[in-house]
Amino acid sequence: MADIIDGKAFAAALRESIADGVADFVAKAGRKPGLAVVLVGEDAASQVYVRNKHKATIAAGMESFEYRLAADTSQAELLALVEALNADPAVDGILVQLPLPNGLDENAVIQTIDPDKDVDGFTTTSTGRLLTGLPGFVACTPLGCLMLLKDRLGDLSGKSAVVIGRSNIVGKPMAQLLLRESCTVTIAHSRTADLPAVVRGADIVVAAVGRPEMVKGDWLKPGATVIDVGINRVPAAEEGKTKLVGDVDFASASEVAGAITPVPGGVGPMTIACLLYNTLEAANRREGIA
Ligand SMILES: Nc1nc2c(c(=O)[nH]1)N[C@@H](CN(C=O)c1ccc(C(=O)N[C@@H](CCC(=O)O)C(=O)O)cc1)CN2
Ligand SMILES: [Mg+2]
């Protein structure tokens, strides 16, 4: 049976160490690090994530600035808010919760964020810095996956890694991070031929496709480390109920893998912990604190 990689516990410990770093920052800078979170519209899951971000920000000793805008907010209003946050000295990090309601241009909004406050790591400046090995912010979910992998495996160099999924938010930055760690990286996707055979060659599998329980145990190399980024809500056995499952079929995969993240309680909690990590980093950089 695979070891379970406890992302919830790892994230809690990371948040504790960030709180210590925040206390150091306050002592040196004479102010708290500030995170601004912008939520547009009524998406139910986004409301939960934003509430959790607010609570975690406060618990870490940071300032939380929350902006909740109506679903019919115009592009110009949203861009004006982001520009005001760029100019606000109390704000170290800016995050616009995704997805945005239809009609708003997500890319234009993201690219308006000052790259030095881009704690989501979504601007092309941030992704370009990652690609070229310059210091910058890395998207929170892949950064969290990397932390879990390094905690489990130590040095990743020379390992073969398959990332399933090529999104800008997870798959592509994840592949770049693994390359930076000197893994041999394959990015697989919906057009990949014989995906099970590709996955079977990997020491590290990161599944981020958004397809419930797609990756089966018999796709895995025995002993592989499996990171499941999927958060899929599916009908549960009991009528009218739902449950969360990942992109990996946990029951069969945990028979073959060496270690695996569960859903929930694996990668998900790392996303918010890494947001705090990036915000403290942004604040330290802005104040010139090493
Ligand atoms: N601007 C951003 N938008 C979105 C991001 C992001 O990083 N930046 N990521 C996701 C949503 N997200 C944070 O925003 C997020 C998703 C999931 C979790 C989490 O802890 N999941 C739990 C299960 C939660 C549940 O019960 O539903 C888990 O996996 O254990 C945290 C944050 C999209 N938008
Ligand atoms: Mg402490």
Image: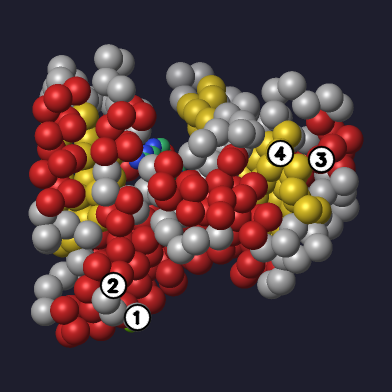
Image coordinates for residue 234, horizontal then vertical, percent: 54, 25
Q: Residue at x 87, y 52 (%)?
A: 222
Q: Which quadrant of the frame does ligand 2 lie within?
A: bottom left
Q: Which mark is residue 11?
A: none
Q: Are marks 1 and 2 in contact (CB under 8 Å)?
A: yes
Res 117 quadrant in image: bottom left
User: According to the image, label 4 marks what residue?
Assistant: 187
What's the residue type where badge 1 is placed? Ala
The yes-or-no answer for disc 3 within 8 Å of ligand 1 is: no
Give the percent coordinates (x, y) of residue 191: 74, 21
Disc nearer the start of the sequence (3/1): 3
Q: Which residue is mark 2?
A: 284
Q: Residue 163, image x and y in percent?
A: 69, 42
Q: Secondary structure at mark 4?
A: strand
Q: Quadrant of residue 151?
A: bottom right
* Res 290 label: 1
The mark closer to the camera, 3 or 1, is 1
Residue that numbered label 3 is attached to = 199
258 w.r.t. 45: above or below: below
Amino acid identity at mark 3: Val
70 sits to left or right of 57: left
